[in-house]
Amino acid sequence: MRVTVTIDRRPEIADPEGTTVKKALHELGFTETTSVRMDRVIHLDVDGDDPVRVKARVEAMCHQLLANPVLEDFVVEVET
Amino acid sequence: MRAAVVVFPGVNCEHDVVHALTALGGEAELVWHRDTDLSGFDGVVLPGGFAHGDALRTGAIARFSPAMREVARLASVGAPVLGICNGWQILCESGLIPGAHIANRDLSFICRFVEVEVVDTNSILTRYAEPGQRLRIPLNSYEGSWVDPSGAGRVVLRYVDDPNGSQDRAAAVANAAGNVVGVMPHPERATDELVGSTDGQVLLESFLRAAPVPA
C-alpha cells in the first residue's frame, strides 16, 4: 500500500531554511507570504492489505526513526 | 584510559581523535560500528563526520548501530562518553544527551576557530579546565545549532560569540551525571601548535583522566 508521511517541524522550533526562502519570496514581490516552513514528505510502499495495521506499523516507524520527537510532529496517511 | 573510537560509515575525524588522545598519553583504538563488545574499554568517543551520509537527520541512523547498545550501557554505568560534532548529534538522537540539532541560524557551513568559555566543570570534558577559562577551538559544522525544549541539557561550554544560534550559546552539553558530553567544536584539532591551538588539550585530558568504571 502507498503511505504518505508528512513530518512537520514543531512551530516553536526555528526553521532557518524556511526563513531564508520567505525572505527570497519577499524580494521577488510575494510580500503576502507571512510564513514558510520546510516540512518533509516521505512516500513509502508497504506490503499489507489492512490499512489500519499498515498505518500502525508506519506510525511505529515514525516513532522509532522517521521523525525526531524533540523537533517534529508527523501525520501518516494510507492511500486506500 | 583506554578509549574506543567508534567508526560509522561516513565519519572522518576518527584518526584525528586517536592521534590526539595518543599524543596526550591515552590509549585509543578504532572500533567498527557493528562491533557489539566494548568490554576492555574505559570510555568511548563518537568522532565527527557524516555518519551514514546524514541520511534522514544527522545521527538518526547511526543511533541504531549495534555498537550504540554498548555505548548506552557504558553511559548508564558512568563510563565517560564523548560525542564530537556528528558524535554529539548521534548522542542526541540516542537520547543520551537531551535535545537535537538543526541547521546553523545563517544556513552557513561554519569552518573557523571559535572561542568558547568554560561555564561548568562538572563533566568529563571540562573537569580540569578553569571556570571562565576561554578556549580557541575549530568549529566545523552545518547542523550545529542545538535546541532543547526540555531544558534538561546542562551547558558546560558556551560560545563567546553566537556563531550558529545554538540555544543558550551551547558549544558543549552534558547529561545530568556529567559522564556523557556532546561538543560541537573539535578539541582534537586543537592539540598541537602546528595546527594553531593547543586549547583542546585540557578538554581531552579531562576525558582521559575521567574516573574509570569497574568492569
Image (spheres, coloured by chain):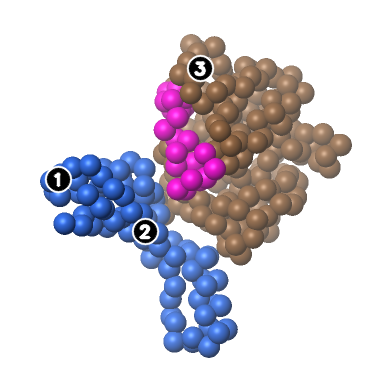
Kindly indicate the quadrant of the structure image that contains residue B108. Answer: bottom right
> What is the chain letter for disc 3?
B
Residue B146, percent across and down? 52, 52
Q: Which residue is mark 3?
A: B38
Q: Nearer the viewer, residue B145 or B58?
A: B58
Identity of the amino acid at label 1?
Asp
What residue appears at the point 80 percent right and 37 percent down from the top-left corner? B198
* Labels 1 & 2 near each other (Cβ < 8 A): no
Please name the color used to draw chain B.
Answer: brown
Task: Provide the secondary structure element on which disc 3 rests.
Answer: loop
Identity of the amino acid at label 2?
Val
What mark, if any, has residue A49 been given in the picture?
1
> What is the chain letter for disc 2?
A
Q: Nearer the viewer, residue B26 or B69?
A: B69
Whether marks 1 and 2 lie on the same chain = yes
Residue A80, percent across and down? 16, 57
Q: Which chain is blue?
A: A
Q: Which residue is mark 2?
A: A41
The alpha-carbon separation of the residues under discs 3 and 2 comes to 38 Å
Identity of the amino acid at label 3?
Leu
Question: Which residues, given as a range, are shown in magenta?
Answer: B52-76
